[in-house]
Protein backbone atom coordinates (compact mmCIF):
# COMPACT_ATOMS: atom_id res chain seq x y z
CA UNK A 1 0.00 0.00 0.00
CA UNK A 2 1.40 3.41 -0.94
CA UNK A 3 2.60 5.61 1.90
CA UNK A 4 0.01 8.21 2.84
CA UNK A 5 1.03 11.87 2.58
CA UNK A 6 1.33 14.00 5.71
CA UNK A 7 -0.81 17.08 6.19
CA UNK A 8 0.37 20.26 7.82
CA UNK A 9 -1.17 21.41 11.07
CA UNK A 10 -1.92 25.14 10.56
CA UNK A 11 -1.60 25.89 14.30
CA UNK A 12 1.67 24.21 15.16
CA UNK A 13 3.17 24.27 11.71
CA UNK A 14 4.15 20.59 11.74
CA UNK A 15 3.19 17.53 9.76
CA UNK A 16 0.51 15.29 11.27
CA UNK A 17 -0.81 12.01 9.97
CA UNK A 18 -4.21 12.29 8.24
CA UNK A 19 -7.25 10.46 9.51
CA UNK A 20 -8.35 7.56 7.28
CA UNK A 21 -12.11 7.14 6.93
CA UNK A 22 -13.40 3.81 5.63
CA UNK A 23 -16.82 2.30 5.05
CA UNK A 24 -17.84 -1.23 3.94
CA UNK A 25 -17.00 -1.88 0.29
CA UNK A 26 -15.39 1.52 -0.14
CA UNK A 27 -11.88 2.74 -0.63
CA UNK A 28 -10.22 4.69 2.18
CA UNK A 29 -10.31 8.45 1.92
CA UNK A 30 -8.32 11.07 3.78
CA UNK A 31 -9.65 13.80 6.01
CA UNK A 32 -7.40 16.40 7.61
CA UNK A 33 -7.57 16.70 11.37
CA UNK A 34 -8.97 20.16 12.11
CA UNK A 35 -6.62 22.41 14.04
CA UNK A 36 -9.13 24.33 16.13
CA UNK A 37 -12.67 23.81 17.28
CA UNK A 38 -15.31 26.24 16.14
CA UNK A 39 -16.41 27.23 19.63
CA UNK A 40 -18.05 30.41 20.76
CA UNK A 41 -15.98 33.11 22.44
CA UNK A 42 -17.57 32.71 25.87
CA UNK A 43 -17.30 28.93 25.74
CA UNK A 44 -13.55 29.12 25.06
CA UNK A 45 -12.67 31.67 27.76
CA UNK A 46 -11.15 30.59 31.06
CA UNK A 47 -14.08 30.91 33.46
CA UNK A 48 -12.02 30.66 36.65
CA UNK A 49 -9.64 33.46 35.66
CA UNK A 50 -12.59 35.67 34.70
CA UNK A 51 -14.20 35.10 38.10
CA UNK A 52 -10.99 35.92 39.97
CA UNK A 53 -10.43 39.14 38.01
CA UNK A 54 -14.10 40.07 38.40
CA UNK A 55 -13.92 39.73 42.19
CA UNK A 56 -10.77 41.84 42.23
CA UNK A 57 -12.52 44.61 40.28
CA UNK A 58 -15.57 44.47 42.56
CA UNK A 59 -13.38 44.83 45.65
CA UNK A 60 -11.50 47.66 43.95
CA UNK A 61 -14.68 49.58 43.17
CA UNK A 62 -15.92 49.13 46.72
CA UNK A 63 -12.67 50.19 48.38
CA UNK A 64 -11.94 53.11 46.05
CA UNK A 65 -15.29 54.64 46.92
CA UNK A 66 -14.69 54.02 50.62
CA UNK A 67 -11.29 55.73 50.50
CA UNK A 68 -12.21 58.69 48.28
CA UNK A 69 -15.73 59.88 49.15
CA UNK A 70 -14.58 62.33 51.83
CA UNK A 71 -11.50 63.55 49.94
CA UNK A 72 -13.55 63.89 46.75
CA UNK A 73 -16.17 65.98 48.56
CA UNK A 74 -13.60 68.19 50.30
CA UNK A 75 -11.70 68.92 47.10
CA UNK A 76 -14.29 68.76 44.32
CA UNK A 77 -17.61 69.19 46.11
CA UNK A 78 -18.86 65.75 45.07
CA UNK A 79 -18.56 62.48 46.96
CA UNK A 80 -18.58 60.39 43.78
CA UNK A 81 -16.40 62.37 41.36
CA UNK A 82 -13.17 60.43 42.01
CA UNK A 83 -15.11 57.16 42.23
CA UNK A 84 -16.72 57.77 38.83
CA UNK A 85 -13.25 58.33 37.38
CA UNK A 86 -12.33 54.88 38.66
CA UNK A 87 -15.54 53.46 37.16
CA UNK A 88 -14.58 55.01 33.83
CA UNK A 89 -11.06 53.60 34.05
CA UNK A 90 -12.46 50.19 34.92
CA UNK A 91 -14.79 50.27 31.93
CA UNK A 92 -11.95 51.18 29.57
CA UNK A 93 -9.74 48.47 31.08
CA UNK A 94 -12.47 45.83 30.65
CA UNK A 95 -12.83 46.74 26.98
CA UNK A 96 -9.05 46.44 26.53
CA UNK A 97 -9.09 43.06 28.28
CA UNK A 98 -11.89 41.84 26.01
CA UNK A 99 -10.00 42.93 22.89
CA UNK A 100 -6.80 41.26 24.06
CA UNK A 101 -8.71 38.07 24.81
CA UNK A 102 -10.35 38.00 21.36
CA UNK A 103 -7.14 38.68 19.41
CA UNK A 104 -4.91 35.66 18.94
CA UNK A 105 -1.94 36.25 21.26
CA UNK A 106 0.50 34.88 18.64
CA UNK A 107 0.05 38.10 16.64
CA UNK A 108 1.82 40.09 19.37
CA UNK A 109 4.94 37.99 18.93
CA UNK A 110 5.52 39.60 15.54
CA UNK A 111 4.89 43.08 16.95
CA UNK A 112 7.03 42.69 20.08
CA UNK A 113 10.02 44.66 18.74
CA UNK A 114 7.86 47.56 17.55
CA UNK A 115 6.01 47.72 20.86
CA UNK A 116 9.29 47.72 22.78
CA UNK A 117 10.69 50.58 20.68
CA UNK A 118 7.50 52.60 21.23
CA UNK A 119 7.75 51.98 24.97
CA UNK A 120 11.40 53.06 25.12
CA UNK A 121 10.45 56.18 23.17
CA UNK A 122 7.70 56.94 25.70
CA UNK A 123 10.16 56.47 28.59
CA UNK A 124 12.54 58.97 26.95
CA UNK A 125 9.67 61.37 26.28
CA UNK A 126 8.57 61.37 29.91
CA UNK A 127 12.10 62.38 30.96
CA UNK A 128 12.04 65.27 28.49
CA UNK A 129 8.43 66.45 28.60
CA UNK A 130 6.84 64.65 31.54
CA UNK A 131 4.75 66.17 34.31
CA UNK A 132 6.57 66.91 37.58
CA UNK A 133 4.81 65.67 40.70
CA UNK A 134 6.18 65.01 44.20
CA UNK A 135 9.78 65.37 43.02
CA UNK A 136 9.45 62.84 40.18
CA UNK A 137 8.64 62.90 36.49
CA UNK A 138 6.68 59.75 35.66
CA UNK A 139 3.63 60.71 33.58
CA UNK A 140 2.54 62.33 30.35
CA UNK A 141 -0.67 64.06 29.21
CA UNK A 142 -1.41 65.79 32.53
CA UNK A 143 -0.75 62.70 34.59
CA UNK A 144 -3.13 60.42 32.68
CA UNK A 145 -0.48 58.09 31.20
CA UNK A 146 2.52 56.55 32.97
CA UNK A 147 4.94 54.88 30.52
CA UNK A 148 6.53 52.94 33.40
CA UNK A 149 3.32 50.94 33.86
CA UNK A 150 3.23 50.14 30.15
CA UNK A 151 6.91 49.15 30.23
CA UNK A 152 6.17 46.37 32.72
CA UNK A 153 3.66 44.73 30.37
CA UNK A 154 5.67 45.24 27.18
CA UNK A 155 8.83 43.86 28.75
CA UNK A 156 7.00 40.65 29.67
CA UNK A 157 5.64 40.39 26.14
CA UNK A 158 8.97 41.08 24.47
CA UNK A 159 10.98 38.78 26.72
CA UNK A 160 8.51 35.96 26.11
CA UNK A 161 9.01 36.38 22.36
CA UNK A 162 12.79 36.79 22.61
CA UNK A 163 13.41 33.93 25.02
CA UNK A 164 11.13 31.52 23.15
CA UNK A 165 13.04 32.22 19.92
CA UNK A 166 16.45 31.56 21.55
CA UNK A 167 15.81 28.28 23.27
CA UNK A 168 19.17 26.82 22.18
CA UNK A 169 21.12 29.99 23.05
CA UNK A 170 19.77 30.93 26.49
CA UNK A 171 22.81 29.50 28.29
CA UNK A 172 25.22 31.21 25.91
CA UNK A 173 27.02 34.20 27.42
CA UNK A 174 27.31 36.02 24.09
CA UNK A 175 23.86 35.35 22.67
CA UNK A 176 21.93 34.85 25.90
CA UNK A 177 22.97 36.63 29.08
CA UNK A 178 24.72 39.71 27.66
CA UNK A 179 21.96 40.91 25.28
CA UNK A 180 19.37 40.06 27.94
CA UNK A 181 21.18 42.14 30.57
CA UNK A 182 21.70 45.07 28.18
CA UNK A 183 18.02 45.15 27.20
CA UNK A 184 16.70 44.95 30.74
CA UNK A 185 19.35 47.41 31.92
CA UNK A 186 18.36 50.07 29.36
CA UNK A 187 14.70 49.97 30.37
CA UNK A 188 15.53 49.87 34.10
CA UNK A 189 17.89 52.85 33.88
CA UNK A 190 15.31 54.95 32.00
CA UNK A 191 12.76 54.22 34.74
CA UNK A 192 15.25 54.90 37.53
CA UNK A 193 15.89 58.32 35.99
CA UNK A 194 12.26 59.35 36.68
CA UNK A 195 12.90 58.13 39.49
CA UNK A 196 10.66 55.09 40.06
CA UNK A 197 12.56 52.45 42.01
CA UNK A 198 9.66 50.05 42.60
CA UNK A 199 8.78 49.80 38.90
CA UNK A 200 12.42 49.28 37.91
CA UNK A 201 12.84 46.61 40.59
CA UNK A 202 9.67 44.85 39.43
CA UNK A 203 10.87 44.72 35.83
CA UNK A 204 14.29 43.38 36.83
CA UNK A 205 12.77 40.72 39.11
CA UNK A 206 10.20 39.54 36.56
CA UNK A 207 12.80 39.46 33.79
CA UNK A 208 15.20 37.44 35.92
CA UNK A 209 12.57 34.82 36.79
CA UNK A 210 11.50 34.54 33.14
CA UNK A 211 15.13 34.08 32.16
CA UNK A 212 15.42 31.26 34.68
CA UNK A 213 12.22 29.58 33.43
CA UNK A 214 13.51 29.75 29.86
CA UNK A 215 16.52 27.63 30.83
CA UNK A 216 19.25 30.06 31.93
CA UNK A 217 22.53 28.81 33.31
CA UNK A 218 22.24 28.84 37.10
CA UNK A 219 25.80 30.01 37.76
CA UNK A 220 25.47 32.91 35.32
CA UNK A 221 22.11 33.81 36.84
CA UNK A 222 23.46 33.71 40.41
CA UNK A 223 26.44 35.92 39.56
CA UNK A 224 24.25 38.39 37.68
CA UNK A 225 21.69 38.48 40.50
CA UNK A 226 24.37 39.21 43.05
CA UNK A 227 25.79 41.98 40.87
CA UNK A 228 22.33 43.53 40.39
CA UNK A 229 21.70 43.40 44.15
CA UNK A 230 25.00 45.18 44.87
CA UNK A 231 24.34 47.85 42.24
CA UNK A 232 20.81 48.35 43.59
CA UNK A 233 22.05 48.78 47.15
CA UNK A 234 24.70 51.29 46.08
CA UNK A 235 22.13 53.21 44.04
CA UNK A 236 19.62 53.41 46.88
CA UNK A 237 22.13 54.39 49.56
CA UNK A 238 24.43 56.76 47.65
CA UNK A 239 23.53 58.00 44.17
CA UNK A 240 19.76 57.52 44.22
CA UNK A 241 17.11 60.00 45.42
CA UNK A 242 17.46 61.10 49.03
CA UNK A 243 14.09 59.68 50.06
CA UNK A 244 15.23 56.15 49.17
CA UNK A 245 18.09 56.19 51.67
CA UNK A 246 15.78 57.58 54.39
CA UNK A 247 13.27 54.81 53.78
CA UNK A 248 15.92 52.12 54.02
CA UNK A 249 17.28 53.66 57.23
CA UNK A 250 13.82 53.91 58.83
CA UNK A 251 13.06 50.33 57.80
CA UNK A 252 16.26 49.11 59.46
CA UNK A 253 15.41 51.07 62.61
CA UNK A 254 11.86 49.77 62.60
CA UNK A 255 13.01 46.15 62.68
CA UNK A 256 14.22 46.64 66.26
CA UNK A 257 11.61 49.23 67.30
CA UNK A 258 8.44 49.64 65.27
CA UNK A 259 7.96 53.17 66.63
CA UNK A 260 11.06 54.18 64.67
CA UNK A 261 9.64 52.90 61.39
CA UNK A 262 8.52 55.11 58.52
CA UNK A 263 5.41 57.19 59.22
CA UNK A 264 3.56 55.47 56.39
CA UNK A 265 4.28 52.03 57.85
CA UNK A 266 3.26 53.08 61.36
CA UNK A 267 -0.11 54.36 60.17
CA UNK A 268 -0.70 51.14 58.23
CA UNK A 269 0.03 49.07 61.34
CA UNK A 270 -2.42 51.20 63.34
CA UNK A 271 -5.05 50.51 60.67
CA UNK A 272 -4.54 46.74 60.93
CA UNK A 273 -4.71 46.93 64.73
CA UNK A 274 -7.97 48.86 64.54
CA UNK A 275 -9.48 46.29 62.18
CA UNK A 276 -8.86 43.19 64.26
CA UNK A 277 -10.46 40.00 62.96
CA UNK A 278 -13.62 41.28 61.29
CA UNK A 279 -12.89 45.00 60.78
CA UNK A 280 -14.69 48.17 61.86
CA UNK A 281 -17.09 48.03 58.92
CA UNK A 282 -17.03 49.15 55.30
CA UNK A 283 -16.58 52.91 55.11
CA UNK A 284 -16.06 53.21 58.88
CA UNK A 285 -12.26 53.25 58.92
CA UNK A 286 -10.55 56.29 60.48
CA UNK A 287 -6.97 56.03 59.21
CA UNK A 288 -7.92 57.06 55.68
CA UNK A 289 -8.96 60.51 56.93
CA UNK A 290 -5.62 62.28 56.72
CA UNK A 291 -3.43 59.68 58.42
CA UNK A 292 -2.63 57.12 55.72
CA UNK A 293 -0.80 58.61 52.72
CA UNK A 294 -2.54 57.79 49.41
CA UNK A 295 -5.23 55.54 50.92
CA UNK A 296 -6.85 54.93 47.51
CA UNK A 297 -3.60 53.76 45.85
CA UNK A 298 -0.50 52.68 47.80
CA UNK A 299 -2.26 52.21 51.18
CA UNK A 300 -5.51 50.61 50.06
CA UNK A 301 -4.55 47.23 51.54
CA UNK A 302 -4.23 48.85 54.98
CA UNK A 303 -7.72 50.30 54.57
CA UNK A 304 -8.98 46.82 53.67
CA UNK A 305 -7.36 45.50 56.84
CA UNK A 306 -9.01 48.20 58.96
CA UNK A 307 -12.51 48.06 57.49
CA UNK A 308 -12.78 44.37 56.60
CA UNK A 309 -10.37 43.02 59.18
CA UNK A 310 -8.04 40.07 58.97
CA UNK A 311 -10.72 38.06 57.19
CA UNK A 312 -11.06 40.62 54.40
CA UNK A 313 -7.29 40.98 54.01
CA UNK A 314 -6.96 37.17 53.93
CA UNK A 315 -9.59 36.99 51.19
CA UNK A 316 -7.55 39.40 49.04
CA UNK A 317 -4.37 37.39 49.61
CA UNK A 318 -6.24 34.16 48.78
CA UNK A 319 -7.45 35.69 45.52
CA UNK A 320 -3.87 36.49 44.51
CA UNK A 321 -2.85 32.92 45.34
CA UNK A 322 -5.75 31.64 43.21
CA UNK A 323 -4.69 33.97 40.38
CA UNK A 324 -1.14 32.61 40.48
CA UNK A 325 -2.37 29.01 40.57
CA UNK A 326 -4.64 29.59 37.58
CA UNK A 327 -1.85 31.35 35.69
CA UNK A 328 0.46 28.39 36.23
CA UNK A 329 -2.24 26.03 34.95
CA UNK A 330 -2.77 28.10 31.80
CA UNK A 331 0.99 28.29 31.19
CA UNK A 332 1.37 24.51 31.51
CA UNK A 333 -1.39 23.95 28.97
CA UNK A 334 -0.21 26.51 26.40
CA UNK A 335 0.29 25.15 22.90
CA UNK A 336 3.70 26.78 22.41
CA UNK A 337 6.65 28.09 24.38
CA UNK A 338 5.84 31.71 23.61
CA UNK A 339 2.39 31.37 25.15
CA UNK A 340 3.75 29.49 28.15
CA UNK A 341 6.46 32.08 28.88
CA UNK A 342 4.02 34.93 28.28
CA UNK A 343 1.49 33.64 30.81
CA UNK A 344 4.22 32.72 33.28
CA UNK A 345 5.70 36.21 33.03
CA UNK A 346 2.32 37.92 33.43
CA UNK A 347 1.51 35.76 36.46
CA UNK A 348 4.86 36.52 38.09
CA UNK A 349 4.41 40.22 37.33
CA UNK A 350 1.05 40.43 39.13
CA UNK A 351 2.33 38.31 42.01
CA UNK A 352 5.42 40.50 42.57
CA UNK A 353 3.40 43.73 42.46
CA UNK A 354 0.88 42.35 44.95
CA UNK A 355 3.58 40.93 47.20
CA UNK A 356 5.48 44.22 47.17
CA UNK A 357 2.44 46.29 48.15
CA UNK A 358 1.35 43.88 50.91
CA UNK A 359 4.92 43.56 52.23
CA UNK A 360 5.21 47.35 52.54
CA UNK A 361 1.91 47.61 54.42
CA UNK A 362 2.99 44.88 56.85
CA UNK A 363 6.46 46.41 57.47
CA UNK A 364 8.35 43.57 55.75
CA UNK A 365 10.18 45.73 53.17
CA UNK A 366 11.02 49.45 52.92
CA UNK A 367 8.16 51.65 51.67
CA UNK A 368 7.64 51.89 47.91
CA UNK A 369 5.02 53.37 45.65
CA UNK A 370 3.65 50.11 44.25
CA UNK A 371 -0.17 49.97 43.86
CA UNK A 372 -2.22 46.89 44.71
CA UNK A 373 -2.95 45.11 41.38
CA UNK A 374 -6.57 45.26 40.11
CA UNK A 375 -7.74 47.08 43.27
CA UNK A 376 -5.91 50.41 43.65
CA UNK A 377 -7.08 53.56 41.91
CA UNK A 378 -5.09 54.41 38.79
CA UNK A 379 -5.99 54.37 35.12
CA UNK A 380 -2.64 53.36 33.61
CA UNK A 381 -2.07 50.57 36.11
CA UNK A 382 -5.58 49.15 35.75
CA UNK A 383 -5.55 49.22 31.95
CA UNK A 384 -2.19 47.46 31.57
CA UNK A 385 -3.06 44.88 34.23
CA UNK A 386 -6.33 43.97 32.54
CA UNK A 387 -4.55 43.94 29.19
CA UNK A 388 -2.23 41.35 30.71
CA UNK A 389 -5.24 39.38 31.97
CA UNK A 390 -6.65 39.54 28.45
CA UNK A 391 -3.44 38.04 27.06
CA UNK A 392 -3.74 35.20 29.55
CA UNK A 393 -7.34 34.63 28.46
CA UNK A 394 -6.20 34.59 24.82
CA UNK A 395 -3.62 31.88 25.53
CA UNK A 396 -6.26 29.83 27.34
CA UNK A 397 -8.77 30.42 24.52
CA UNK A 398 -6.40 29.22 21.81
CA UNK A 399 -5.70 26.14 23.88
CA UNK A 400 -9.43 25.50 24.43
CA UNK A 401 -10.11 25.71 20.69
CA UNK A 402 -7.57 23.01 19.93
CA UNK A 403 -9.21 19.74 18.89
CA UNK A 404 -6.28 17.41 19.36
CA UNK A 405 -6.35 15.12 22.41
CA UNK A 406 -4.06 15.89 25.33
CA UNK A 407 -1.82 12.93 24.75
CA UNK A 408 -1.05 13.78 21.13
CA UNK A 409 1.80 15.85 19.75
CA UNK A 410 -0.59 18.54 18.52
CA UNK A 411 -1.85 19.70 21.91
CA UNK A 412 0.03 18.07 24.77
CA UNK A 413 -0.46 18.81 28.43
CA UNK A 414 3.03 20.36 28.23
CA UNK A 415 3.93 20.05 31.88
CA UNK A 416 7.49 21.00 30.91
CA UNK A 417 6.58 23.60 28.29
CA UNK A 418 8.49 26.42 30.00
CA UNK A 419 11.86 24.74 29.77
CA UNK A 420 13.34 21.27 29.99
CA UNK A 421 16.99 22.19 29.78
CA UNK A 422 20.13 20.34 30.64
CA UNK A 423 21.62 23.09 32.85
CA UNK A 424 25.10 21.62 32.60
CA UNK A 425 27.84 23.90 31.31
CA UNK A 426 29.21 21.47 28.79
CA UNK A 427 28.41 23.29 25.59
CA UNK A 428 26.33 26.24 26.78
CA UNK A 429 23.19 24.98 25.07
CA UNK A 430 19.92 23.57 26.32
CA UNK A 431 19.21 19.98 25.45
CA UNK A 432 16.02 19.95 23.40
CA UNK A 433 13.65 16.99 23.11
CA UNK A 434 13.85 14.79 20.06
CA UNK A 435 11.28 15.25 17.34
CA UNK A 436 8.40 12.92 17.92
CA UNK A 437 8.73 12.82 21.72
CA UNK A 438 5.14 13.36 22.83
CA UNK A 439 6.14 14.21 26.39
CA UNK A 440 7.69 17.53 25.43
CA UNK A 441 7.53 18.30 21.72
CA UNK A 442 9.49 21.04 20.15
CA UNK A 443 7.95 24.46 19.83
CA UNK A 444 7.09 25.86 16.41
CA UNK A 445 9.74 27.73 14.53
CA UNK A 446 10.42 31.30 15.52
CA UNK A 447 8.78 34.12 13.65
CA UNK A 448 12.11 35.79 13.31
Image (spheres, rainbow, N blue to C red):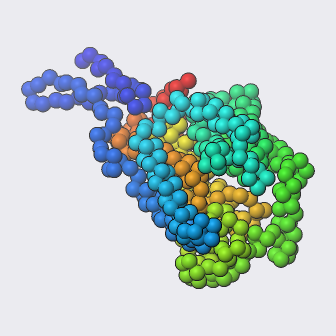
Question: Position of 253 compared to 117: left or right?
Answer: right
Question: Position of 98 compared to 342: left or right?
Answer: left
> Residue 181, image x and y in percent?
74, 36
Compare residues 196 and 388 and report the one nearer the observer. Answer: 196
Decide if residue 267 is in sight here: yes
Q: Residue furthest right?
A: 238
Image quarter of residue 250 = bottom right
> Residue 167, image x and y in percent?
60, 32
> Residue placed at 46% from the left, 54% from the top?
91
Compare residues 42 and 370 and report the one nearer the observer. Answer: 370
Decide if residue 333 is in sight here: no
Question: Position of 391 compared to 425: left or right?
Answer: left
Question: Position of 232 compared to 159: left or right?
Answer: right
> Residue 70, image x and y in percent?
60, 73
- Vertical position of residue 263 compared to residue 234: above or below: below
Q: Residue furthest left?
A: 25
Compare residues 132 and 408 and report the one nearer the observer. Answer: 132
- Vertical position of residue 107 compared to residue 298: above or below: above
> Residue placed at 40% from the left, 35% from the top?
410
Image quarter of residue 302 = bottom right
> Residue placed at 74% from the left, 40% from the top?
127
> Residue 34, image x and y in percent?
30, 33
Image quarter of residue 231 = top right
> Residue placed at 68% from the left, 57% from the top?
370
- Vertical position of residue 165 compared to residue 285: above or below: above
- Vertical position of residue 103 compared to residue 243: above or below: above
Amino acid sequence: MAEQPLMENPVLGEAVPPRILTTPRSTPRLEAVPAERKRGLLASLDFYLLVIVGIFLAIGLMMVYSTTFDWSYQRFGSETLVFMQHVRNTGIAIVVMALMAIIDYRIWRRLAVVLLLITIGALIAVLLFGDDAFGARRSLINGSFQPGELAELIMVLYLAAWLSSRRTQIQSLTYGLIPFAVLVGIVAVLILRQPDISTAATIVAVAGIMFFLAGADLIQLAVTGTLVAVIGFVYVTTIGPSYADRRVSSFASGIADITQADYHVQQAIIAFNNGGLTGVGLGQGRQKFGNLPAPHTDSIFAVIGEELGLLGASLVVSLYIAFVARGIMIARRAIDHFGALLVAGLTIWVAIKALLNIAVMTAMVPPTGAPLPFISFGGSSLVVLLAGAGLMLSVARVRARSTAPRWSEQAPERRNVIANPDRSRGNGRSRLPRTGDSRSPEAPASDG
